[in-house]
Structure formats: C-alpha cells, structure tokens
Image: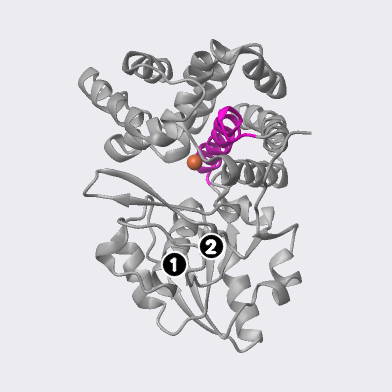
Amino acid sequence: MDKFRFYLPTEVFAGRGCVRAHADAWVLGRRALIVTSQHGAKLSGALDDVMSILNDRAIESVLFDGVSANPDAEQVYAGVAAAEGCDFVVALGGGSPLDAAKAIAWAAGAKVPREDFFRRSPAPGEAVLPVVAVPLTCGTGSEVTPYAIITNHEAQTKVNVSGPNLFPRVALLDAHYLESLPKAVMCDTALDALSHAIEGAYSPRATQLTLAMSEEAIRTLLPELLRLAHGEFVNLPQLHYAAMLAGMVIAQTGTGLVHAMGYPLTYHKGIPHGRANGILLAGYLEFMERPCGPLTRRLLDAAGLHGPEELQALVDALLDVTGAEREAPTEDELARFAREPLRLSVVRRYRAMPSPEEVVDIYRTGF
Ligand SMILES: [Fe+2]
C-alpha cells in the first residue's frame, strides 16, 4: 500500500428522506442562514423539508436566495449581511449556492473585510460558521470539498477560495431532489463530476485510494451518461453517489488543466462550468495518453471506452440531446484563453505540462 493522507471531515448521509431522518445531526445551532438560488431548492422540495424541520424545532432561520450561477464577492457579502446573528449555514443547491454558502460561512465567521476577500485564504483554526450542504445537482461534489469557487471580476476569472475549515460539517444526499432537475443541468453537472474523477487521477497528489475512487466514480457515471444520451431513465442515486465520490477525489488532489481551461469558457463565453469541462475532456485524455499511457488506459477501461474519441462522441451526443449550446471561441480568443491556464501553479505541478499550442489543440478538439 502507498503512503497517503486522506482528510475528509464531512459527515455524509445518503438516501431518500435523509434530511428528516438525520435532523439531529445537522441542526447545528439556534439560528440558520439558508443559502440557495431563486428556484432549485423550491422546485425540488428541499427548501420545504428544511424549513419544516427547523420550524418543528423552533429554530429561527433567514433565507438568502440571492445566489446566481458563478457567484461573485458581491453576492457573498450580501449573504454575509443576511447572516447577522446566525450560528450555522444550510446550503441548498448546485455548486454555486454551496460554494457561496462556504464563502459566506468564512467571511461572516472570521469577519473578513470585503477588500481582503481575494487577498487571503481561510486560515486553519479561523472561525467559520458550520455548513450543512444539501446538493441538488449531481456534479460539483462541493458538499465534500474545502473549496468555494467565486468569480473575481477584477481578475476576470474564477478564484478558488479554499481552506481545511471550508469542508461542510454535514452533507445530505437525497437523490429524490434531483427529479426536478432539467436534463441539461443534469448532463452538465454529471460531466463536471466526470472531469473531477479524471483530472484528480492525473494529479501529482493522487494516491492509490483516490485512484480507486476515481475509477469507481467513472465506472458509475458512464452508464448513466449513456442513458442520458439515449433519453433513457437515469439512476439518480448513482449519479449523486458518483458526484460525491469525484468530489472526495478533488478534495484530496485539487483540479487541474481541464478546470483551468474551462474557467475562461465560462467567464467569457457563458458556457456552464460542467459543460465547459466536458467539452475539453476528450482532448485532455488524448494529450495525457502520451505521457501517461497506462493510467489513461486504466481510466478508459473504467469508462468502458476504447479511446478518447468515444468520449468525444458521447459528449457530443449529450449536448445534442439536451439542446445545450457551445459557442466556439474565435482563434484570437483561443490564443488568449490558452495563456491563462499555463500561468497557474496548480497546472504547472501536473505530470505533463502542455505547450500553449497543445492547449489550443485541446480546445479545438472540443469544438
Ligand atoms: Fe468542477
């Protein structure tokens, strides 16, 4: 067995009805800040469930439903203002509400001034309000990671605010809440989970344990993605499970080139996060085949695919069936986007570092 360290302090409950069944484990204070977006939590029934449990227990709550896709620091600080007097945070939604909630929990708990928000990271031991995460999509894995991805308009990209105290205290996975999820969102978020499993596998911080988790996530995701592509019934608990597993992987390894390349597609072209990653995945695997042949074969075997081109065909089919858009960047944009990821130390530490031309090739493969 390899030497490794595995840190994951989040208590996870999964299964239908887990929010009500495990209320003793997640009602963590006397006044809750509920962080969500405008619609998802209401449509899924998750908000009603949480509110009724809090009301039954005479726990006060404040609803902050001002989180949109790709939340920025202004939304975080609107949440901080709403958090006045709250002693725990309940986050309901996809990656955006979950990430915003974690950032709010830090900024409110540690009283971080707005001007310092992007200048420093949550320090170990710093006071952070405990977070209860209820994922209502099947991709981000944010319910089991120490990351909050927040848009920084000055830097024109997304910033990973992270620290060990940003892990949610409790995660509640009830796949019943995914039933109201639009197919395009389900597909985009599942592709995000797939990219977490694959990027994490290539990370220099991957271990025997995280590799096994990556393979299990990939093995679980692929049949569901195929069913989605064919318009068939999808096993929602399996999707939730795989997204959580892939989240546990990146909680240890971080993400790499695909995410770094995906951020400009989201920021400048408006392509949702998971879709942007999904578009880039086959080109990335093709690039990694050369320096990391056996590992790439292992990941493709877990996926049941012969080669990266089969993954590209699957992604194309998924985008077609959900009517998802992917506006191709211009040549000028590609040249500009290709410079950004290579500047990031997280990418430079990886097992293989592409040239700017190879980064452009990976972009081209996806479009
Ligand atoms: Fe992601």
Residue 20 versus residue 267 in the image, above or below: below
Whole-percent x and y of residue 218?
A: 67, 31
Residue at the far bottom: name it.
58
The residue lying at 52 percent from left, 14 percent from top is 286
* Label 1: element kind: helix
Q: Tell me which secondary structure the magenta stretch mostly adopts.
A: helix
Residue 104 versus residue 225 in the image, above or below: below
Whole-percent x and y of residue 19?
A: 69, 67
Quarter in which the N terminus is drawn: top right
Whole-percent x and y of residue 187?
A: 54, 37
The residue lying at 49 percent from left, 29 percent from top is 278
Residue 276 versus residue 91 in the image, above or below: above
Of residues 274 and 146, the one nearer the viewer is 146
Of residues 271 and 230, the one nearer the viewer is 271
Q: Amino acid at mark 2?
A: Asn
Gap in angstroms between the C-alphas marked 1 and 2: 8 Å
Q: Is residue 285 left or right of residue 67?
A: right
Mark toward the start of the polypeptide (1 vs 2): 1
- Residue, disc 2: 165
Of residues 7 and 147, the one nearer the viewer is 7
Residue at the far front: name it.
3
- Residue, disc 1: 106
Segment tinted magenta in the rendering = 182-206
Task: Please give the label number shown on residue 315.
Answer: none
Instruction: Sort mark 1 into few (<14), some (14-19) or many (20+) by Cα contacts within 10 Å.
Output: many
Q: Is residue 227 magenta?
A: no
